[in-house]
Image: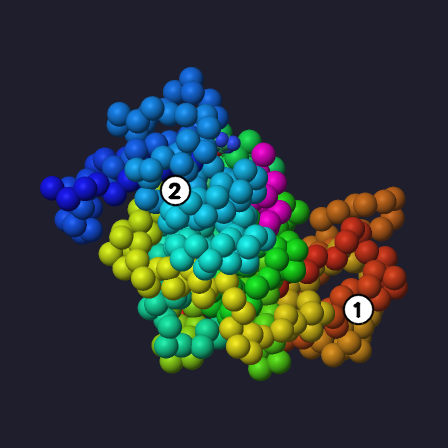
Amino acid sequence: MSSAIGVGILGVGTVGQGVVRILADSAELLEQRVGQPIKVVAAAVRDLDKKRDYLPDGVALTTDPMEVLTNPLVDVVFEAMGGIEPAKSLILKALRLGKHVVTANKALLADHGTEIFEAARLAERAVCFEAAVAGGIPIIQALNVGLAANRILSISAILNGTCNFILTAMTRDGKAYGDVLKEAQSLGYAEADPTMDVDGTDTAHKLAVLVQIAFGQTVSTEQVSRRGIDRLEAADIRFAGELGYVIKLLAKARWRPDGLELRVSPTLVPKGSQLAEISDSYNAVRVEGSAVGDTLFAGRGAGMMPTASAMVSDLIGILIEPRSRIRAAAELWKPFAGAPRLINIDEHRTRAYLRFQIPDRPGQLAHLARILGDNGISIASVIQHEPETLASSEVVYVSLIIMTHLATKGAMRRALEHIQKTCELNGEPILLEVDARAGQPN
Ligand SMILES: NC(=O)c1ccc[n+]([C@@H]2O[C@H](COP(=O)([O-])OP(=O)(O)OC[C@H]3O[C@@H](n4cnc5c(N)ncnc54)[C@H](OP(=O)(O)O)[C@@H]3O)[C@@H](O)[C@H]2O)c1
């Protein structure tokens, strides 16, 4: 028997335990694929007493990650601890010690990728991160290899399973955001502190990673304009439904001759389109390539086994094609020649869903329509609902929903500011983007 490939694992939590489980359950198959047995030889955790369902067989756990990195039997280090530090320092150290690295840490890659991949280049080692975006969906390899013949024209993706689960339940049951979030937490679909998921930060991390691979543009999370689902109202989900749409939290990147549009926002997508059909905690990535046209990748975007599936696939990639993985790590995080500039959010073009609570009086709609027109925004359709709110003694408000044609976000911002100054609105106006290209109807 050939000598074993040694694996060291930093973090034996949800994802780390999944890795251990696949390496044990599929040992024979994996050995056939790579021609050598694979063995977990060292693992680090914070708390040695914590109960774990899947423990590395015969491996003493340590609380000192350096013991894992310096173990001479460790060839490949799995970073599955999360967070920025000490994960970053440990990855850099592992590379300096000549180990390949597999990580699922999108937050770290999004904001420190340049430093990590420069260290990989100097060490001539691979850093693989299939699990960092869309969990079990092999989108990184698809962009790197499968679609390499294409200029990527656009990406529209559902990248956060927690948000998609919440939006699916709000749409199906008509419940309020807060109630569904509590339910998602009790079912384990949302963290006790779900802030990074629901405010769009996690999706922005993943979009930053995708943009690096697809467009050769290094962007920090801060540069991605983002809005989450945490302020979404049940009324908008209902009205969107009446208009033939569902609301999804979309990460979007669109190449234009003059630059790249990037954003994360709750977006109306047409019912029956491919992205509209992605429910519960599933993820999907729609990629439009210059030669291939539209492609759609869908599957489980998180969870123990899907995430571990992606990490173990990276390990196999490193073992069967080390030179190409090392080369990819050395080249990936550099700007492509002619990488596009980022387009300011005010210059982004979109169709929009606008909702206003206006006084139920003649002339109000004409006034709003005039302001929108003055700002170059043309109206595609309007619906007005029967009065619902008696906000003060005399004033009765009605919900007015306006769907617009394409216009810049800047024009919309200016129009809404003007409307707020000159109309007696109840509450803030609501603006949601409308995705005109959410895939072909099924
Ligand atoms: N969970 C998912 O579905 C998923 C999906 C895609 C990507 N990811 C990414 O995968 C990574 C891990 O996520 P997870 O859900 O598996 O997290 P988790 O369940 O919290 O596990 C983290 C593990 O790291 C260990 N750890 C943390 N800090 C440590 C330190 N300083 N020294 C030693 N061990 C330390 C913890 O030890 P203890 O067990 O002793 O506390 C635990 O075993 C994160 O980057 C996450 O973003 C997760």
Residue 57 spot, x, y in % from top left: 26, 27
Task: Identify the residue at horizontal 39%, vertical 20% (top origin).
Answer: 51
Could you classify mark 1 by the number of other residues whose Cα lies within 10 Å: few (under 14), some (14-19), or many (20 or more)?
some
The foreground one among 306 and 78 is 78
Residue 276 located within the stretch drawn in magenta: no
The foreground one among 178 and 193 is 193
Q: Which residue lies furthest to the left in this view?
A: 1
Image quarter in which the C terminus is found: bottom left
Where residue 86 sits, quadrant-wise, is top right
| Amino acid at circle 1 | Arg
| Numbered mark located on residue 414 in the image | 1
* 2 or 1: mark nearer the eye: 2
Task: Identify the residue at horizontal 36%, vertical 35% (top origin).
Answer: 71
376 relative position to 295: left or right: right
Magenta range = 193-201
Would you say residue 105 is visible in this rendering?
A: no
| Amino acid at circle 2 | Phe
